[in-house]
Image (cartoon, helix red, strand yellow):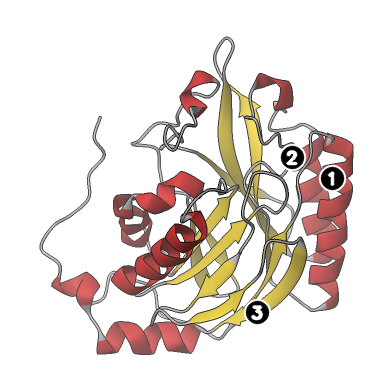
Amino acid sequence: MSPHPPTRPSVRVTVAQLQGSPDHAANRQVVSDAFRTAEQVHADLVVFPEYSSGFDPHGVGVAHVEAIDGPFVSLLRERAAQTGVAAIAGTTLPGGPGRAVNAVVGVDGSGGLVGVYRKVHLYDAFGHRESDRLEPGPVDARPLVLDVAGLRFGVMTCYDLRFPESARRLVDAGAQVLVVPAAWAEGELKVMHWHTLAVARAIENTSAVVAVGMAGRGVIGHSLVVGPDGMVGLELDDEPGVRTVDVDGALLGEVREQNPSLSNRRYSVTPRL
């Protein structure tokens, strides 16, 4: 018997590639507008980038912290309840003294807070050091997986995309679609890395991938949606944009039947404590 739930009809997903700013109130307005668009196209889920509540290309830290019951998450819950559209979005939560937490929240279509993922892999690479400002989430925390309209969406964040174990752990928790909110830093080969890694995570996990990048200064945008067969169904450029796609549950089932690599594997993933 397969450990994964049966696939269902398509789920409509709105990709909200926003341009974040340090102005939290302005960001909330942009998020609210994206909910309106998602509602108009009858989306089941809207996905926002990492750091959607407040962003600084020089580094996000305690200056952008909001409590889990603060204005940003409260807005997500209110708009989800009003529109019936579930949401996945990046924010910044309080950490220990002098530290913040890079987090992604999942909200269902009734406005309920399903869970919070606290980013495990901090971006200490390519000249950046998130660990100077942020504390990592616990590696053994329960994976954040949301049920939306018959499919299961597993959540990771930005730099996590470079670690295939993160995606595989979500699949082990039942995820059929991998969701990656990001503020992927610009630089040489970075668009190619982003694109290649998203496609690889889709193919090796026979899962769809919804990778939503932030647009604007210092980041690349280029949100993309990849099918479980590795085919890219949507890719934006580096400008802000809101687009909607259908994630095909039937295709997920077909690909996993044709390529049962998840059943054929011989190694498991365990947290490195």
User: Residue at 10% of width from left, 63% of height from top?
Assistant: 266
Secondary element at tag 3: strand
Cβ–Cβ under 8 Å for marks 1 and 2:
yes
Judging from the image, what secondary structure is the residue with disc 2 in? loop
Q: Counting residues from the N terminus, which is met first, the one under dot 3 or under dot 1?
A: 1
Q: Residue at x 61, y 59 (%)?
A: 212
Q: CA distance from mark 2 to mark 3?
A: 24 Å
Q: How far apart are the alpha carbons under marks 3 and 1?
A: 23 Å
Q: Quadrant of the N terminus?
A: bottom left
**Chain-order first, disc 2 or disc 3:** 2
Q: Residue at x 56, y 45 (%)?
A: 185
The relative height of residue 72 versus residue 263 in the rendered view (above or below) is: above
Frontmost residue, 247 versus 241: 241
The residue positioned 13% from the left and 57% from the top of the image is 267
Residue carrying label 1: 28
The residue labelled by disc 3 is 245
Q: Earlier in the sequence, mark 1 or mark 2?
A: 1
Residue type at mark 3 is: Val
Q: Position of residue 213 (x, y in %)?
A: 62, 56
Image quarter for residue 12? Answer: bottom right
Relative horizontal placement of residue 167, taking residue 74 as reference (left or right): left
- Give the numbered dot on residue 53: 2
Amino acid identity at mark 1:
Arg
Q: In the structure shown, which secondary structural element does the residue marked by tag 1 occupy?
A: helix
Foreground pick, 73 / 186: 186
| Quadrant housing the C terminus | top left
Left or right, residue 209 beside residue 34: left
Label 1 crowd bin: few (<14), some (14–19), many (20+), radius 10 Å: many
Q: Is residue 212 left or right of residue 259?
A: right
Q: Amino acid at mark 2?
A: Ser
